Amino acid sequence: MAKHFTQGTVRLRDDCKRPWYQGLWRVYLEGEPKPKWKTIHLGFVGETSRREAKRRLQKRLSEEQRNVVNAQKGITLNDY
C-alpha cells in the first residue's frame, strides 16, 4: 500500500523521432527503503502544451491518491 506520492514533474522527451511530454512521480511504499518511480505518457509536443501536460499529471496523481484513500477506509485503528 502506498504511503504518499510526490507532486510529480513533467519533462520533455526529445530523444526520439516525435517529442513528447512524460510525467514522473515517486511513490513511497510501506516497508520499502527507496521510493518507486512511476511514469506516464502525457501527450506529444505540438498536440499538447506543457501546461496541459501538467494538468493531466495532476489529475492522474489525484486519482491515484483517491484510490489509496478508498483502499485504506476499511482499516481499523487496531489494524493500523
Image (cartoon, helix red, strand yellow):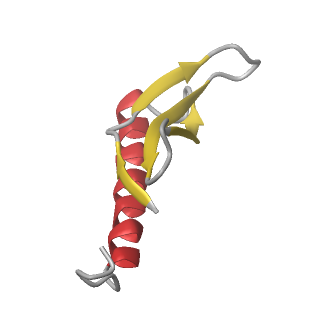
Q: Quadrant of residue 68?
A: bottom left
Taking the view exactly as shown, the residue that stands out farthest to the right is 17
- Describe residue 17's horizontal placement relative to residue 13 as left or right: right
Instruction: Tell me the quadrant of the picture where the C terminus can be found.
Output: bottom left
Q: How many marks?
A: 0
Q: Position of residue 71 (x, y in %)?
A: 41, 76
**Does 69 appear above or below 24?**
below
Taking the view exactly as shown, the residue that stands out farthest to the front is 78
- Describe residue 41's horizontal placement relative to residue 31 as left or right: right
Q: Nearer the viewer, residue 41 or 44?
A: 41
Q: Position of residue 29 (x, y in %)?
A: 46, 51
The residue depicted at 42 percent of the width and 44 percent of the height is 57
Q: Nearer the viewer, residue 77 or 25?
A: 77
**Does 75 appear above or below 60?**
below
Q: Position of residue 38 (x, y in %)?
A: 55, 41
Q: Position of residue 53 (x, y in %)?
A: 43, 37
The residue depicted at 56 percent of the width and 38 percent of the height is 43
**Does 75 appear above or below 35?**
below
**Does 65 appear above or below 69?**
above
The residue depicted at 32 percent of the width and 39 percent of the height is 7
Q: Quadrant of residue 25?
A: top left
The residue depicted at 56 percent of the width and 26 percent of the height is 45
Taking the view exactly as shown, the residue that stands out farthest to the left is 77
